[in-house]
Image: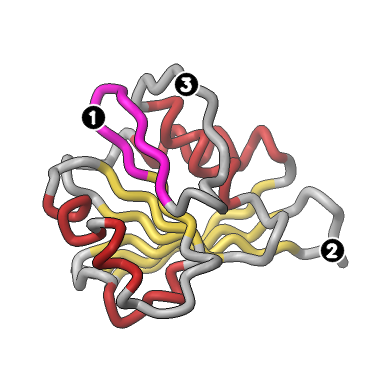
Amino acid sequence: MTERTVITTSESETFELAVNFAKTLEAGSVICLSGDLGAGKTVFAKGICSALDVTEYISSPTFTIVNEYEGKMRVFHFDMYRIEDEDELIEIGYDEYLASGGICIIEWPENIKNSLPKKRIEISILRDLSVGDDVRKVIFKEFK
């Protein structure tokens, strides 16, 4: 596992960090985004999608569980916040999404930790309100 940390000081910096990060992705990449409500997970997902030329509006798929987008590669954006049982993943075709060769972005991955693939990139976005409202510590961990 490799790990690195980046500090951002604005929403636009977090977005740009995601844009640059997305340039390193390959077909089939799985990105797990963790952080409190309002930490910037969806902002990060928007940056990834922007870099992949997705032109649709990107929103958190809280009630649909997964949103699909077309760009340079297909993007599947999951929100696992409301998943109560990992058996629900079968109903949405989770394994098929992972095997599709598209980019999978998973918000709230801690709710499905037993179903995450071994090869993934975990990104934790932490707010540091003691420094300022917009300061984020973004921690990247790559599992191979």
Q: Do the CB atoms of the residues marked 1 and 2 lie less than 8 Å apart?
A: no
- Counting residues from the N terminus, which is met first, the one under dot 1 or under dot 3? 3
* Residue type for callout 1: Met
| Residue under numbered circle 3 | 56
Give the distance between the C-alpha atoms of the residues marked 1 and 2, in whole angstroms. 36 Å
Residue 86 sits above or below residue 99 on the image: below
Give the magenta range.
66-76
Q: Nearer the viewer, mark 1 or mark 2?
A: 1
- The x and y percentages for residue 75 are 32, 37
| Residue under numbered circle 1 | 73
Q: Give the residue at x 25% y 59%.
A: 94
Residue 71 shown left or right of residue 96 in the figure:
right
Residue 5 sits above or below residue 113 on the image: above
Name the residue nearer the viewer: 91 or 22: 91
Residue 3 shown left or right of residue 98 in the figure:
right
| Residue under numbered circle 2 | 129
* Residue type for callout 2: Leu
- Counting residues from the N terminus, which is met first, the one under dot 2 or under dot 3? 3
- Crowd rating for badge 3 (residues with CA inside 10 Å; few <14, some 14–19, many 20+): few
